[in-house]
Amino acid sequence: VRIGNLSRRLTLFTDHGAIDVEQASDGRFDADPQAVYGRWDEFTEWAATAKNGAVPFEAAELGPPAPRPTQVFAVGVNYREHAAEGGVGIPSAPMLFTKWVSSVTGPVGDIELPSESVDWEVELVAVIGRRARRVPVERAWDHIAGLTAGQDISERAVQMGIKPFSQLSLAKSFPGFSPTGPWLVTPDEFTDPDDLEVACSVNGETMQRAHTSDLVFSIPALVAELSAVLTLEPGDVLWTGTPGGVGLGRKPPQYLRPGDELVTTIQGIGEMRHRFVSA
Ligand code: ZN
């Protein structure tokens, strides 16, 4: 099942187009895309039967699949290759931070550049579909509603502005710095949800390309580690980290400029397309 946010309404996407969930379910499910995660099992059961009435849609109307999560989790240095690029080694536990919710945006459109040191980070993003508390790795996928594409856009001067510390959460929370989409794909749709190709390009030049099988902490491992400490709520969002190829790691560093187009692609999910504009 593919679900998402079309003109701020919960929408089911099929090969033939978009189905408005509130209308197709005669009001059984609310139009608010965030509300569905609280009734995920009931919803997916209904969605499996709702195949008719799809209509064409405009990609420009797509929004983030989880627009108002209670909690957003993000993880640093979580690809073996990216850890090598940063020269920091592989962490023994996930290095966690957040992206504040005011930075959430959709899979298409313009993003303002607050400075000349804004970087790209393609990431696979998971949304929680069932409350998770002390969940073992073997049962963790049962708590995932689905997967979507994300860009953990990062302002590197803020990130490194208080050395030797990292200001990760603030640096990654400017308006528009947390785009996700184009929709959420349920885990059963993938041949192997633990091995997806993630990639991004700037003005057509590929900057990052990797497989999520290279993750230090897989999605199940992250759910187990997080839920050992706290409770993951339905609709919470989990960013899984970025592979090598970010602008910061280039010599000299390369950052986004006004007019640049960033295309983010994840195998089995789809693509996001953003243009950067000066503030
Ligand atoms: Zn990141």
Image (spheres, grey):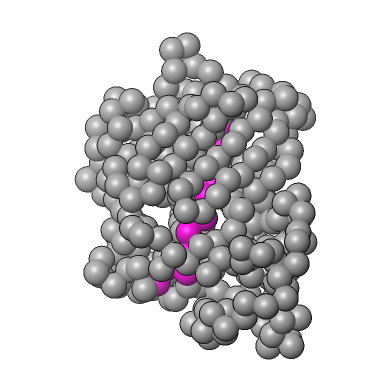
Which residue extends farthest top? 252
Q: Nearer the viewer, residue 27 or 66?
A: 27
Range shown magenta: 143-155
Question: Looking at the picture, does residue 207 appear above or below residue 231?
Answer: above
Residue in the picture at 51% in, 53% down:
269
Report whether residue 74 is seen.
no
Residue in the picture at 59% in, 26% down:
204
Name which quarter of the figure residue 50 lies in.
bottom right
Label count reads: 0
Q: Please identify the dominant SS of the magenta region.
A: strand
Name which quarter of the figure residue 29 lies in.
bottom right
Query: Residue 132 placed where, x, y %?
Result: 38, 73
Question: Looking at the picture, does residue 50 appear above or below residue 196?
Answer: below
Query: Residue 26 placed where, x, y %?
Result: 74, 88
Residue in the picture at 40% in, 72% down:
143
Q: Is residue 228 magenta?
A: no
Q: Is residue 153 magenta?
A: yes
Query: Residue 133 placed where, x, y %?
Result: 35, 74
User: In screen coordinates, is 101 left or right of 210?
Assistant: right
Residue in the picture at 61% in, 53% down:
182
User: In screen coordinates, is 158 left or right of 105?
Assistant: left
* Image quarter of the C terminus: top right
Q: Nearer the viewer, residue 245 or 169?
A: 245
Query: Residue 70 placed where, x, y %?
Result: 56, 65
Report whether residue 85 is seen.
yes
